[in-house]
Amino acid sequence: MTCTSAKDQEKTPEANVSSCPVNDAVSAPQQSSEECFRSFRNALGQFATGVTVVTSVGLDGNPIGLTISSFNSVSLDPPLILWSLSLNSPNLETFRKARYYAINILSAEQTDVSYRFASRVENRFSGISQRTGLGGAPLIDGCSAWFECEAEAQYPGGDHLILVGRVVRFAQGASESPLIFHNGRYRRLDPSAP
């Protein structure tokens, strides 16, 4: 991948433009791949997302879970969601083979849960209040919502695997304020906003 930045292109007053053309002969100086990826990631960071923990049961029968923000709805009929997982994830094979998994939508009070499941802590579930969902997938207490899914499809997506799940059961929690991730930081919705 090659990358050109706004320094190399005509600037617009309201934007710092970067592009990463593929197989494009560009005469302007190029950013390194690392700089391009960082610029691309920073631009993606401007899109605010919710934060979720995806859980399932590992190949060894123990619960597994990880923090993701790459979650989205796909369809209402049938009810489908999607999320993606890095091809470098140590949990890749487990989720490829999982028949069931749960999407736990974290509430604004669960920043510590997000950090825990994003870390390399050996037993991420230690001290986490939970109950058992479909196929044994843990449902973390205190979330804004839960989606219990059966694996529907998987697709290659560059350096990630895209997983589509059919929602079998779902519930909304008591907390109406979700945990938000924007520009590399956790955020909260402004409760005074209309």
Image: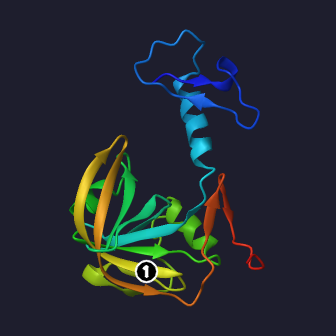
Quadrant where the C terminus is found in the figure: bottom right
Q: Position of residue 175 (x, y in %)?
A: 59, 86
- Secondary structure of the residue carrying numbered label 1: strand
Residue at 56% in and 68% down: 114
Which quadrant of the view contains residue 18? top right
Q: Which residue is mark 1?
A: 146
In terms of depth relative to the viewer, which is nearer, 59 or 74?
74
Which quadrant of the view contains residue 23? top left
Residue at 69% in and 65% down: 187
Q: Position of residue 13 (x, y in %)?
A: 76, 33
Residue at 62% in and 66% down: 180
Q: Is residue 103 visible?
A: yes
Location of residue 162 with respect to 139 vertically, above or below: above
Q: Report whether 125 appears left or right of 159.
A: right
Q: Position of residue 34 (x, y in %)?
A: 55, 29
Q: Report whether 3 appears left or right of 78.
A: right
Q: Position of residue 192 (x, y in %)?
A: 78, 79
Location of residue 171 with respect to 97 vertically, above or below: below
> Which amino acid lies under the numbered mark 1 shown in the image of this protein?
Trp
